[in-house]
Image (cartoon, helix red, strand yellow):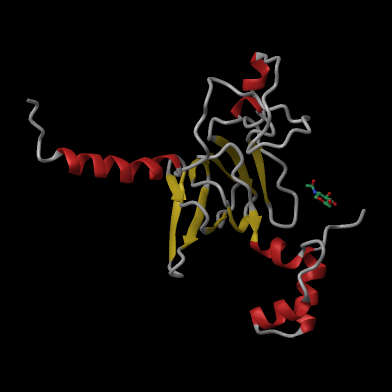
């Protein structure tokens, strides 16, 4: 007769408890080697439908080598290398981006609903931080070669307080992390978030709310 270790039931319980958390940690797990995104398909699935014909260029992107143009309101620019640029990332659960910062540049407070982010500093020095749901600011000054982590879904930012440009590479555990930039989300949505929601939320008057909305409105050229 087989003898069972008394620890076996415990081990089974531990495995059953850990299994769902492993599969919920990032994007859904893949069910085949590759599923290169057909970005033009009308078929809606969780992610993108798979293309029939695949080439090496579906797994290739050249765009992160050079600094992006930071001549804008915030003095920073994000260049994504996600599934929209690299269709081969579809179902693989990872992506990257490069962020460039002019002196004084800010990547304003934002969240990624689908990914944790790891920042690796290519050059310069940045003041970075995230805020927990308990409203604690976790902040640090980081410099060339340093890594900083922003947990999934938490508000975070990076500011270049130096007088030379800065740049980072960001890694994400999602093929398309998504970004909600708080100021733009609240003050530049279409249709507009009602003024009486924002005046009460921020405890200011309609004039102040309208001033922010006009500053953040997409520039008409
Ligand atoms: C930055 O952008 C502004 C407005 O688009 C433009 O007038 C200015 O010449 C630009 N500066 C540089 C250095 O490109």
Q: Where is the N terminus found, in terms of image quarters?
A: top left
Count of marks placed on residues: 0
x then y, percent, for residue 101? 62, 48
x then y, percent, for residue 17? 32, 46
**150 to 1, vertically: above or below:** below
User: Which residue is nearer to you in this view: 90 or 46?
Assistant: 46
User: Which residue is nearer to you in this view: 152 or 205?
Assistant: 152
x then y, percent, for residue 130? 48, 59
x then y, percent, for residue 37? 67, 27
Q: Residue at x 66, y 21 (%)?
A: 58
User: Which residue is nearer to you in this view: 83 or 81?
Assistant: 83
Q: Residue at x 47, y 52 (%)?
A: 150
Corner quadrant of residue 41: top right
**201 to 167, vertically: above or below:** below
**16 to 153, vertically: above or below:** above
Residue occupying the far right of the picture: 221
Residue 28 is left or right of residue 77, and the answer is left
Q: Residue at x 63, y 32 (%)?
A: 64
User: Which residue is nearer to you in this view: 64 or 84?
Assistant: 84
Q: Residue at x 60, y 57 (%)?
A: 110
């Amino acid at each position: 007769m087989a003898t069972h270790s008394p620890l076996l039931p415990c081990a089974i319980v531990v495995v059953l408890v850990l299994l769902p958390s492993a599969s919920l940690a990032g994007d859904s797990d893949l069910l085949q080697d590759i599923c290169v995104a057909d970005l033009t398909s009308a078929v809606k699935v969780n992610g993108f439908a798979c293309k029939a014909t695949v080439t090496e260029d579906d797994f290739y992107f050249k765009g992160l080598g050079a600094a992006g143009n930071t001549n804008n309101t915030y003095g920073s620019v994000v260049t994504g290398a996600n599934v929209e640029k690299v269709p081969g990332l579809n179902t693989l659960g990872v992506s990257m981006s490069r962020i460039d910062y002019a002196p004084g540049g800010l990547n304003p407070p934002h969240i990624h609903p689908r990914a944790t982010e790891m920042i690796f500093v290519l050059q310069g020095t940045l003041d970075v931080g995230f805020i927990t749901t308990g409203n604690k600011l976790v902040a640090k000054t980081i410099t060339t070669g340093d890594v900083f982590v922003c947990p999934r879904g938490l508000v975070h930012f990076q500011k270049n307080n130096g007088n030379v440009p800065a740049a980072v590479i960001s890694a994400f555990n999602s093929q398309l992390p998504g970004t909600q930039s708080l100021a733009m989300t609240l003050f530049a949505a279409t249709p507009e978030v009602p003024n009486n929601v924002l005046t009460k939320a921020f405890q200011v008057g309609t004039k102040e709310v309208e001033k922010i909305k006009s500053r953040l409105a997409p520039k008409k050229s």
